[in-house]
Image (spheres, rainbow, N blue to C red):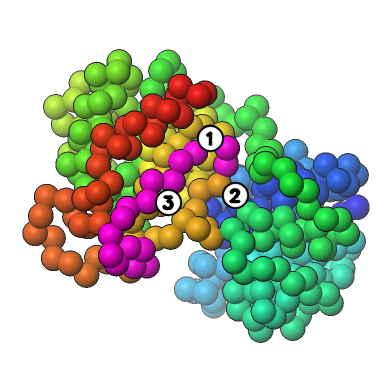
Amino acid sequence: MKLLLVKTSSLGDVLHALPALTEARARLPALECHWVVEEAYADIPAWHPAVTRVIPVALRRWRRAPLAACRSGQARNFVRQLRALRYDCVLDAQGLLKTAPVTLLARGPRVGFDRRSAREGLAAFVYDRAVPVDRRQHAVERLRTLFGGALGYAPGAVAPDYGIDRTRLPASAVDGDYLVFLHGSTWSSKLWPDVHWRVLIERAGQAGLRVFLPWGDAVERARAERLVAGHAHARVLTPLGLPELAATLAGARGVVGVDSGPTHLATALGVPTVALYGATDPLLTGTWGLRQRRAQALYPCAPCLRRVCRFAAEDAVHPPCYGQLDPDAVWAQLGELLAAA
């Protein structure tokens, strides 16, 4: 059976589709999946053994410069790749208006969330068959339900298996016993306070563990350098691509991270991970796996779902919801995960 999966972004969303694909392959051993995904995340589907072809798309970039996309022939080439084969099922697991045209252009019966289940209900009108899915489920479970409804089986009561083949990752540039602290996010309201990170780095040093801090832009690099200052056992990593970051996370004893794509990646790789939540709610889209903990801040306005905290940054702990999510409690949770591992 040939399946075309349309799940384009973002990093966490793409990872959330992997357990559903693992289960589908277990139920349908002859399943062969081709995956349409944003170019920035094109490495991820190739890590799963059920995926035999990855079709990168650049919807984000093309929306910013549509004329350039047409003149360069990139959009035309994408459509050519998309329509090269006829599929037994074209599954839109995104449920957005931006992916509806991609689904419509593909060749084969089109399936997706029904109008009440999709994030943007109008997308359902391009499907030949729509699957009702409870919106109160976590994203991983929603996608498992969608895959089952599309491919003709009832999802089982099993722990999620992301199915990532670690042999497809590059060799890690670091080795030995180390932790990775994922401190960066595009939302300032998600950032755990520097004073907390520094205490956590100290705890790691007392336990004889090295700490590595990756970064994604100049702001994150400056924060990482600020956090490791004075700690001989901690250092800032060189720039990493997605495969190299995955390899570094895969080799770690444990990970602590804010609500971000890399934290989801650590969980998907089965690394003991503590995910920090303040402004955001982990109930529907949080990290999901056997070897992870969600540390949720307790505060009257949390989760506020605001990109920027509405309180002035006057105290050492900001955003203030993280005042009760202190580093000693986080270190204790990480210690429990490491002991169990």
Q: Please report the bounds of the magenta region as a residue range.
A: 289-305
Q: Which residue is mark 2?
A: 15
Q: Residue at x 75, y 38 (%)?
A: 49
Q: Residues within 10 Å of mark 2 (few under 14, many from 20)?
A: many
Q: Is residue 175 left or right of residue 100?
A: left
The single residue placed furthest to the left in the displayed view is: 314
Q: Secondary structure at mark 3?
A: loop
Q: In the image, which disc is placed on residue 260?
A: 3
Quarter holding residue 99: bottom right
**Residue 149 drawn at (x, y percent):** 81, 63
Q: Residues within 10 Å of mark 1 (few under 14, many from 20)?
A: some
Q: Residues within 10 Å of mark 3 (few under 14, many from 20)?
A: many
Q: Secondary structure at mark 2?
A: helix
Q: CA distance from mark 3 to mark 2?
A: 12 Å
Residue 157 visible, this orientation? yes
Residue 51 visible, this orientation? no
Q: Is residue 266 left or right of residue 95?
A: left
Q: Secondary structure at mark 1?
A: loop
- Work out whether mark 1 precedes mark 3 in sequence or the reverse, and give the earlier one: 3
- Work out whether mark 3 precedes mark 2 in sequence or the reverse, and give the earlier one: 2
Q: Which amino acid type is shown beneath numbered disc 2?
A: Leu
Q: CA distance from mark 1 to mark 3?
A: 17 Å
Q: Residue at x 67, y 68 (%)?
A: 134
Q: Is residue 290 magenta?
A: yes
Q: In the image, which disc is placed on residue 44?
A: none
100 or 153: nearer the eye? 153
Q: CA distance from mark 1 to mark 2?
A: 16 Å
Which is in the foreground here, disc 1 or disc 2?
1
In the image, residue 106 sits, relative to residue 18, either above or below, namely below
Q: In the image, which disc is placed on residue 291?
A: 1
